[in-house]
Image (cartoon, grey):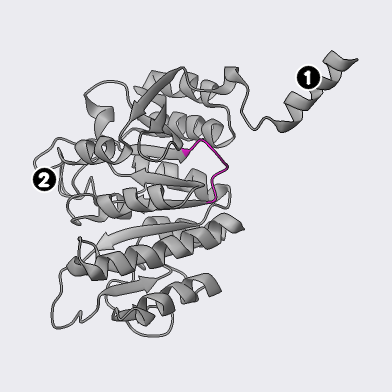
Amino acid sequence: MGLVLALMGCQSTSGEAPETSNPTARELVDLRSRILSYTAEFGPDTPYAAPDERQREQLAKGVGRLLAGDAREAERLLAPIGLGITRLTDTDSGRRYDEVAALRPGRSARWGRLYVSADSGVHWSAQVPHPVADRDTESLGVRLLEDTPGGALVLAGAHREAGRGDAADVAHREDSAFHTIVRELQERGVPGVQLHGFAESSDRPYDAVISTGAAESAPGEVAALADRMAGEGLRVCRGWSARCPLEGTTNVQGREAQRRHATFVHVELAPDARGGGPEAKEAAKALSGLLRTWAKD
């Protein structure tokens, strides 16, 4: 009887997924260095080709299983399209993440990556569609992932000018791995913030332009984000109450969110609000506050 009670006690206190559902590959890494080393290779002349329809369907199935907590089955589904899953432990924080990434160099390596918290459910996502091209948005995305537990980082795998035409501009393409992953998150009701950058000019006298994409209203927590930034001295344009440049109304992830009744926040930041200066620190702090609100829901 004592042995039975002890075993029951172990089962009730363990938050670990069964070993058979965990990824087979594991690494101890500096998370920030790992991600930024990947994006450092991006350039406008890099080859890029989007996954075909069959590959996108397979990716959706694999990501769906990962979000459901079955990384081992997700591995099986993703392997045929050249992707794998690695359980990462960050040397700085000790937090664990499941990384979806290409198994080897080649076409699939330019599709991007997904990082999902392995220590809790996924309550929010940060999306970086134009890493390097929108300078420092990739670094901001990593910071948000590091600062707030319970999230996912969706990272495009190529410079927005890579490939032919606008093939790699994943914020305006539905045939990308990026869009496929974001859609799977939205389908599960995970709210997301998408990070962009713009160059300051006379018709853009702002530090931040915040909007909800195709939607014309903003949830209370998004309005609070704008108020928090403004309270720290940042010049903010609110897309739901003013006419702003760069509102993201043609953003395909925003349109998908509207169709699925998911929360989507489109954030455009001026250079000083996404670099290493005081404005960038205040913007990052405000965004982390938004994600913490979502993490509590």
Residue at horizontal 29 percent and vertical 36 percent from the top? 111
Residue at the disc numbered 2:
44
Image height of 57 relative to 215, above or below: above
Evaluate whether residue 66 shows in this view. yes
Of the 4 image quadrants, the one containing the N terminus is top right
Viewer-nearest residue: 100 or 140: 140
The magenta-colored residue range is 117-123
Q: Does the segment drawn in magenta span residue 186?
A: no
Image height of 105 relative to 115, above or below: above
Instruction: Answer with the quarter of the image where residue 171 lies.
Output: bottom left
Residue at horizontal 34 percent and vertical 62 percent from the top? 284
Where in the figure is residue 39, as x and y percent of width and height? 21, 41
Where in the figure is residue 66, as x and y percent of width and height? 52, 32
Residue lying farthest to the front in this orientation: 2
Residue at the disc numbered 1:
7
Residue at horizontal 42 percent and vertical 64 percent from the top? 265
Of the 4 image quadrants, the one containing the C terminus is bottom right
Classed neighbour count for the residue bearing mark 1: other residues with Cα under 10 Å, few (<14), some (14–19), many (≥20)? few
* C-alpha gap between disc 2 and disc 1: 57 Å
Where in the figure is residue 269, as x and y percent of width and height? 26, 67
